[in-house]
Image (cartoon, grey):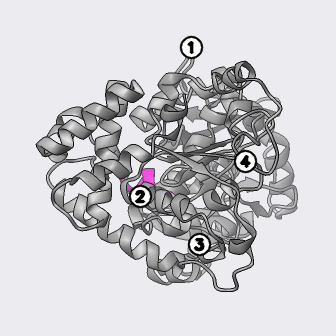
Amino acid sequence: MPATVLSAATLGIDAYPVHVEVDTDRQLPSFTVVGLPDNAVRESKERVMAAIRNAGYEWPRRRVTVNLAPADIRKEGSGFDLPIAIGILKASGQLRASRLGDFALLGELSLDGALRPIHGVLSTALGLRAHQCYGMIVPQANAREAALASGPLVYGASTLGQAVEILQGDCRLPPFALDLDALFQRCAAHEVDFSEVRGQEHAKRALEVAAAGGHNLFLVGSPGSGKTLLARRLPSILPDLTLEEALATTQVHSVAGLLPPDQPLITTRPFRAPHHTISDAGLIGGGACPRPGEVSLAHHGVLFLDELPEFKRHVLEALRQPLEDHTVTIARAALSLSFPARFMLIGAMNPCPCGFLGDGRRPCSYSPTAIHRYRARLSGPLLDRIDLHVEVPAVPYSELARREGGEPSERIRQRVNAARKRQLSRFAGTPGLFCNAQLRPRQVRACCSLSPKGEELLGMALSRLGLSARSHDRILKVARTIADLEESDAIHAHHLSEAIQYRALDRSL
């Protein structure tokens, strides 16, 4: 008689249940999979057949038909191997399991019957919470990841035979348990620290302001001035990930297949630094079956783009939507998917093609026209979406020779956390608002009021620098963050002056 096995598949970063229906007829032996399977699912025939035989079971000498319902959504991946094999054993009478409908099954089978890990198990476990499933059987290597969802009971099986024993009740394997608090304490550590940076106090202050308000940052300096060194240490001063943020970040990495095997949960903010030869699909996401790009892999973390003018123009322009909406929508003829993309953008560039404009150590060899052409690779709308422009000069030898280190990241992170708490209390009752960088125009007017002296100072800066309305709002947001770092409810003139100083490209252009 036909057998039905519950499984699941991912669509974007979300999961939906898939019912694997298996039927065996007394006709010429054959194997057919229907329900819009991709090549990996079609090739499951050879893996499932060898795994069943090598696990000690008998392959039915009948026509085997497998339907993946719902049949109007394309199925991809090798995670259907285990439910197909269990369905064949049930339909052929080799499996006695009255509670088969209470379990969801996922896993790729090797030819000897062993279970191999698959991608997107966390998304599947989160999706099955709403399906009221009793338990799920996954490869042993994915058990810790699935247990993060705190949903159905998770059983980690190492072989097809062990999965059969769990379903029949012959195996007393306990469900997998995971201590999230202990996992956070063990994994939440940074490999780099701000105490390793010599000099660059102005740039470090700008990074602190950016971290406190969630602002995008742009670093301009000659080669070797420390732009990359500073950017790589920004995650160490960002607020600690909450459990909800950690699960969302881990979910993206799990779907992309980039989750380390020994780290089921990402507990530190991600730092992504793609090369300037990256394509728009690699940065934003895409493909025939859309996958998350670098902007989504940097979700709740930092996206660092070094040598920004060397990126292709259309690749940079694709950043404009995720910077504003914090999400990426990829439309195809058959479907449209959305990936989260709430990240901090850190860009870096040389002041000129040779990199030594204003350095003092070497003269710049390019004409003003060539320098303007080099900087014009960055469009005005993109620069308007970056809150802070900071010059990073070369570090003098006296700073490099100092034995004592700079201020450690832990101390800076304490001030950043205090500023974020002030912002969260200010935004209480406003859903989706967590930091000053997310303020909308109406909220900017409510939270960033200025004194008459401050209005005069800002008006003078706007007229002299020729700033846009978006730049006006970004200066106010940065000034609000600087005031929060000083625990001030009002924005004073010196807060506004410092915020205006962080528009280096506007002054130079």
Dot 1, crowdedness within 10 Å: few (<14), some or many (≥20)? few
Q: Is residue 337 visible?
A: no
Indicate which label's residue lies in the foreground, 2 or 1: 2
- Determine which of the numbered discs, if any, sits on residue 333 in the image: 1
Residue marked by disc 4: 359
Q: Amino acid at mark 2?
A: Val
Q: Which residue is mark 2?
A: 209
| Residue type at the position of mark 3 | Phe
Q: Secondary structure at mark 4?
A: loop
Q: Which residue is mark 3?
A: 194
Could you tell which of marks 3 and 2 lies nearer the N-terminus? Answer: 3
Q: On the image, which quarter does residue 395 sit in? A: bottom right
Q: CA distance from mark 3 to mark 2?
A: 14 Å
| Count of labels in the image | 4
For mark 2, does the 10 Å Cα neighbourhood hold few (<14), some (14 to 19), or many (20 or more) residues?
A: many
Residue 83's disc is: none
